[in-house]
Image: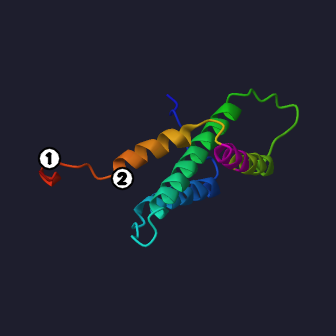
Amino acid sequence: MTPLISSPAIPWQTVILTNRIKNADHILEQPNKDKFPGKKEEQLKKASLELESLFIYYLLKQMRATVPKSGFIPKGKVEEIYTSLIDFRLAEQLALERSIGISRLIYGSLQRISKPEKSVFSLKF
């Protein structure tokens, strides 16, 4: 049985993806300073774009994996590296153009999570 998301065949891909996930996580963990009230919103937008970019990259990678290989032209590691780099850049551009729209959904969810809920005890009568 094959996994739903295959792990990268090349170790450097794993390093790049791990760094991008850590970057998105770091953006969300940065404390919000009262001096810059809009900074938290900017961090949420940046993290949501990063997560959308990762999703699009995996989507492109899985789509390429479904294309049958004829074997007419031999393919090597160089082409595999080049193709994955193209997929990285294409995923970033698609996320920046907001063509898919996942970042808006992620941003909305993160915004709801990050806002403290008002409890009944905090209301003033």
Return the residue at label 1: 120
Q: Which residues are magenta?
A: 89-97
Place of residue 89 in the rendered image (x, y in percent of width and height, measured from the top left): 72, 50
Find residue 15 and report its image quarter: bottom right
Task: Identify which amino acid the numbered label 1 is placed on.
Answer: Val
Is residue 96 a member of the stretch shown in magenta? yes
Residue beneath the point at 57% across and 44% down: 52
How is colour applied across the structure in the image?
rainbow
Task: Identify which amino acid the numbered label 2 is placed on.
Answer: Ser
Find residue 103 and report its image quarter: top right
Pick the residue in front: 80 or 98: 98
What type of secondary structure mainly makes up the magenta span?
helix
Measure the C-alpha gap from mark 2 to mark 1.
19 Å
Place of residue 108 in the rendered image (x, y in percent of width and height, measured from the top left): 45, 43
For label 1, the SS is: helix
Return the residue at label 2: 114
Residue 113 visible? The answer is yes
- 17 vs 77, left or right, is left
For label 2, the SS is: helix
